[in-house]
Amino acid sequence: MQAVANLMTGGSSGPKYLTGDKSSIDGFIDKFDVFLFDCDGVLWSGDHLFERVPATIQMLRDKGKQLVFVTNNSTKSRADYKKKFDSMGISANEEEVFGSSYSAAVYIARILKLEPPKNKVYVLGESGVEQELQAENVPYCGGTDPLLRREMLPEDFRHVADGSLLDDDVAIVLTGLDYHPSYLKYALGMAYLRRGAKFLATNIDSTLPSAGSLFPGAGSTSAPLIKATGQEPLALGKPSQAMMDAIEGKFQFDRKKACMIGDRLNTDIQFGIEGGLGGTLCVLTGVSKKEEFLEKGAQVVPSAYVDELGDLLG
Ligand SMILES: O=C(O)[C@H](O)[C@H](O)COP(=O)(O)O
């Protein structure tokens, strides 16, 4: 069991607690050339920026480190995130952002490569997904369409059942965090899946950390369709290694010289460990608690951890 546990850990010994230990912090940072950052729960909680994050990012840039921001939050596109970074005073450019909406769009456009016109995507999610699909020239419907944000009428049942409310070019159902779910949107998604559409998800996180609390995550968007159809989506966000492969392909780095920094064990830390990165750092300002990886027999254990990202300033 220990051997298996070690497979999912950052190494053979337990995680190193770095907060307050300047020499260990410096030694940890010096081991890596690249830092992959989770966003929600590490840099901020909703619109609340965690203390010393901008200074920490700048310190790593001053040390010549390559930074990649890897978020499962599909509600925003890379351009939207650039605006958020700017508003938070965090030095970052659009090309350094790799979100699950971009990961899904690239997978659909460059891996699935379905033949037009039968390549349309029915989206259950926000504009971040739509923007990235558009950037990859992938046709889509649903998403933020205001006509779907209404109650299900008796004639809707008939028109979904007889197919007149469906788009015959839809070949994929893609779910992401959707702040505007409706029974009508789910009924359409189920109908497309029953017709044989592929079931994809930008991510299936159970919760969304925001305002210092937890809210329904992207997994709450795909859950009704999983329950109704018995099908499971292919998730293209963390911890999917399709996402890690795409990131390595785009940024060209040595995985052994890269560190994943995250707040959630079953996405961020698992993503880094399964990706064979040189190390993982868990930050305790988001979803996971240290007890989860310090307990005996813990399945996913980071290489090291800090109370908050700013502790890396020593
Ligand atoms: O439910 C979700 O989509 C996730 O909680 C959220 O978006 C995670 O974002 P990340 O921590 O990967 O930046």
Image: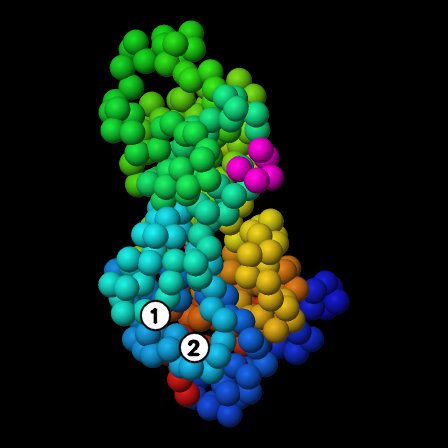
Does residue 118 appear anywhere in the picture? yes
Name the residue at the bottom extreme.
23
For residue 91, which numbered disc appears in the image? 1
Looking at the rendering, which quadrant does residue 300 occupy?
bottom right
Can you see residue 171? no
Q: Nearer the viewer, residue 2 or 311?
A: 311
Residue sitting at x 44%, y 61%:
96
Q: Which residues are magenta?
A: 109-113
Please identify the dominant SS of the magenta region: helix
In the displayed structure, 292 sits above or below 81; it is below
The percent coordinates of residue 205 (x first, y second) are 46, 49
Circle on res. 210: none
Q: Does the magenta run of residues contain 111? A: yes
Check contact, mark 2 vs mark 1: CB within 8 A: yes
Q: Element type at marker 1?
A: loop
What's under tag 1, amino acid-wise?
A: Ser
Q: Name the residue that disc number 2 marks.
A: 61
For the point 41% across and 16% down, which residue is it? 166
Q: Position of residue 27 (x, y in %)?
A: 55, 87
User: Dot 2, crowdedness within 10 Å: few (<14), some or many (≥20)?
Assistant: some
Please state which of residues 264 and 258 is positioned toward the viewer in this rendering.
258
Graded by Cα atoms within 10 Å as few (under 14), some (14 to 19) or many (20 or more), the crowding at tag 1 reads few
| Residue 7 drawn in magenta | no
Measured Cα–Cα span from mark 2 to mark 1: 9 Å
Q: Quadrant of the N terminus?
A: bottom right
Tell me the amino acid under the disc marked 2. Arg
Q: Quadrant of the C terminus?
A: bottom left
The answer to whether the residue bearing label 2 lies less than 8 angstroms from the nearest atom of ligand 1 is: no
| 283 versus 184 height, above or below | below
User: Is residue 258 shown left or right of residue 138?
Assistant: right
